[in-house]
Image (spheres, grey):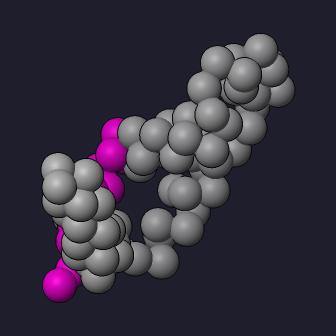
Amino acid sequence: MRWIHLVLALALSTVWLSCSSTRWVHPTKKEDQLTADWNACERDWLNLMAKNPGAAGMLDNQTAQRLRLTKCLQQKGWRQIEEE
């Protein structure tokens, strides 16, 4: 019985999370400047991987890249907000 509750809770949370979406906002920059900042952060990631390819094997490459890009954008003043 406990497994059924766990599976139902997992299924409901997955559905609930898939309904929400996020977007990046900045207090002074416009949304079109997000692309330039995103590309700069991505270029930094690619340069890091080119300099130290062994680091890519330490984490799942997609996860590490997503975390690094998020941190980079936050350092540039961007933040993610949820939309309903």
Q: Tell whether position 5 is magenta.
A: no
Quadrant in which residue 26 is drawn: bottom left
Q: Is residue 46 above or below residue 49?
A: below
Q: Residue at x 55, y 41 (%)?
A: 63
Q: Which residues are magenta?
A: 74-84
Q: Tell whether position 78 is magenta.
A: yes
| Relative image position of residue 8 (x, y in whole percent) | 23, 67
Left or right, 19 with respect to 52, comes to: left
Left or right, 84 with respect to 70, comes to: left
| Relative image position of residue 10 (x, y in whole percent) | 28, 60
| Relative image position of residue 40 (x, y in whole percent) | 61, 49
Using the image as rendered, state which of residue 54 and residue 78 is in the foreground.
54
Q: Is residue 82 above or below residue 77?
A: below
Give the quarter of the figure containing the N terminus: bottom left
Is residue 28 something one can see in this rendering?
no
| Relative image position of residue 54 (x, y in whole percent) | 77, 15
Q: Residue at x 72, y 22 (%)?
A: 57
Q: Is residue 59 above or below residue 79?
A: above
